Image (cartoon, coloured by chain):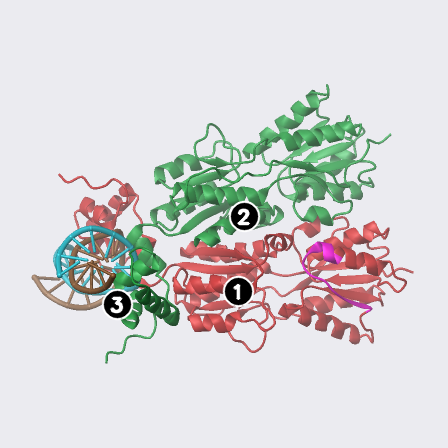
Chain colours: A green, B red, C brown, D cyan
Amino acid sequence: MAQRRTDRVTISDVAALAGVSTAAVSKIVNGKGSFPQATRDRVQRAVVQLNWAPSAAAVALRGARTRAIGMVAGRTPDVLNSDPHFALLIAGIESELAPRDHGLLLHIVGEQPDAAERAYRRLATERRVDGVILTESRVGDPRFALLRGLRLPAVLVGTPWQSDPVPTVRAAEQDQGMADAVEHLVGLGHRRIGYVSGPEDRVHTGRRRAVFTEALARHGLSPSHLLASDFAGQTTGSLVEKVLATADRPSALVLANDMMALAALAAAQRTGRQVPRDLSLIGHDDLPVGHLLHPRLTTVRQDLAGLGRAAALSVLQQLGEEPAGPLPEVTPPQLVVRESTGPAPG
Amino acid sequence: MAQRRTDRVTISDVAALAGVSTAAVSKIVNGKGSFPQATRDRVQRAVVQLNWAPSAAAVALRGARTRAIGMVAGRTPDVLNSDPHFALLIAGIESELAPRDHGLLLHIVGEQPDAAERAYRRLATERRVDGVILTESRVGDPRFALLRGLRLPAVLVGTPWQSDPVPTVRAAEQDQGMADAVEHLVGLGHRRIGYVSGPEDRVHTGRRRAVFTEALARHGLSPSHLLASDFAGQTTGSLVEKVLATADRPSALVLANDMMALAALAAAQRTGRQVPRDLSLIGHDDLPVGHLLHPRLTTVRQDLAGLGRAAALSVLQQLGEEPAGPLPEVTPPQLVVRESTGPAPG
DNA sequence: ATGAAAGCGCTAACAG
DNA sequence: CTGTTAGCGCTTTCAT
């Protein structure tokens, strides 16, 4: 009796144990043909007993589907870390991929533009993934063209740079949250309201600032300050410290994300201001950290997990893995009033 | 002339264009045989022109190597988010995998124990990855046995539960940071020092608490409080608020990570205490957020990126993808004194 | 209803 | 030095 290598159990081992052909095993496991219950049971038992599962490589080679989705984060570790919205997004993505037996192949590359491009290119040419999820839409984003050339299905989470070059998932009423934030502040009597934006190359940066400005304009107001920061909390901190030291300082500040708001809060405390007594603060995203601050952060909540779920489903639909149909609703950005906003001072 | 499908360029296309056999292409691309420069050039040109790269699936099927490493995070999205140390770790891992052309396949599953097990099992049986990186060593961790049964190479980042059941990467002098933290506090005159620990099922929880207690004992002191919290900042916040309301409250608190310290800081402020005047606080990990707080957080820095790098290299060595040899040094945990610690009150 | 056989794209033996 | 060939593990016609 021939001694097979004990490693690597294959479909043939299962077939042998069940006393059927490999073709039968394949069909039964994939629910294809129609077999007598007895046969099906024998095969199922053999599968379990041998702890067998089809080799992903063989399946991929055969059918050209890898059952993996790619994601490339073009950020330095540090910045990635200080903007934890990624984690929420990824969790949402995974929650749809996992039950459908798809994996998420993650690449964190530096900020050099060609590093990201190389990563996408390899994902495509090596056929490691069936599709990719794009985040952090940028001005003049070169990835759409690249991915199209690579014929790699993709979804963008967020606002595309120009026309819809690639399927996109985003919340309806995208701008309402920011508009509400401004209303809230104005309603509290604030007149000197500033905005601290993130990196200029992000598409949403310009957009949110525009919404902010327009919302103020509806009250005959204009921004007291338009500060350009980045995602590094340090920058925001020193920027805000500087502004608070001036005579025409704002009584309220809206910031592009919660980590920046956290930095602003510290800056305020450092310069002896109290929040919200001397300065109101509104963040963006509603990251868990906002609850942990004192005062608790008023913020514009984004349904990051929902966006992740919708994005995953969207690629899956493009791949024909998921029946076409409307994507699940993503909850629109929504103002969550907590403790960091209050009446305008004196 | 036969019209090939325009899609999916394969090695045969390259071979045809270069006028050689597929074997020649394979060898030249992989630097195996020895060929005249002219041939090599023709092949290289064809590769570039066709934008070809070997199909990962075919290579994997052939060689049984997928060039991917797996990681399973058994956490709920929210908890994952509030403990961003993952991001730093992953960044470290990627920084070694990427240049060696390996991917990181990430699975975020819930906290149900069997979810993680299923994930590992599938990673192994479907042969989606060549090895895995384990984090968050737990008491009675069932993963070692599982992975061994699955014959899936693995490394653990952190302290194993018992004997070394699986290769492990960690810093030398693991306990020095915590010991220094206690020294620092005692040196500042603190006598009532408490510790707020994370989930009991983590191996490091008991260990760090023990080191804390021993370090105090060297000064004839014992912990004023030993609080058992979890990673949800909320829990820590209310725990700390409660303790601060008592008469025998601590004058200093050491916390199991920086997010918990952040929560403690807010709790202190909420109950009208000033840090560090009324209460000194020491965190753990040195996450970027610590810089952004006011006061800036004194913390025990962990070289998370270094751990990630070492872990990646360690699996790669097990796989024979990387020459055996000593792993890079991981910087030992180190006390970073900033502003959240000060002289004991009164 | 079930099995034999071809072939997905690649590489390692083996010929020439 | 270079090409032919076999086969990795699986699925899918096509026969039986």
In the picture, the disc for residue B114 is 1
Q: Secondary structure at mark 1?
A: helix
- Quarter of the image containing the C terminus of chain B? bottom right
Residue found at x 27% / y 78% = A3
* Precedes in sequence: disc 2 or disc 3: 3
Residue found at x 29% / y 46% = B52
Label 3, residues with CA under 10 Å away: few <14, some 14-19, many ≥20: some
Residue under label 2: A92
x%, y% of residue A245?
A: 79, 34
Badge nearest the viewer, 2 or 3: 3
Image: magenta residue range? B224-236
Q: Is residue B165 above or below residue B54?
A: below
Relative to A327, is A302 on the left or the right? right
Q: Is residue A266 above or below residue B232?
A: above
Task: Evaluate whether residue B338 shows in this view.
Answer: no
Amino acid type, residue under disc 1 in the picture: Asp
Are the residues flagged by discs 2 and 3 from a single subunit? Answer: yes
Relative to A272, is A37 on the left or the right? left
Q: Which chain letter goes with mark 3?
A: A
Residue under label 3: A20
Label 1, residues with CA under 10 Å away: few <14, some 14-19, many ≥20: few
x%, y% of residue A271?
A: 80, 41
Q: CA distance from mark 2 to mark 3?
A: 41 Å
Q: Secondary structure at mark 2?
A: helix
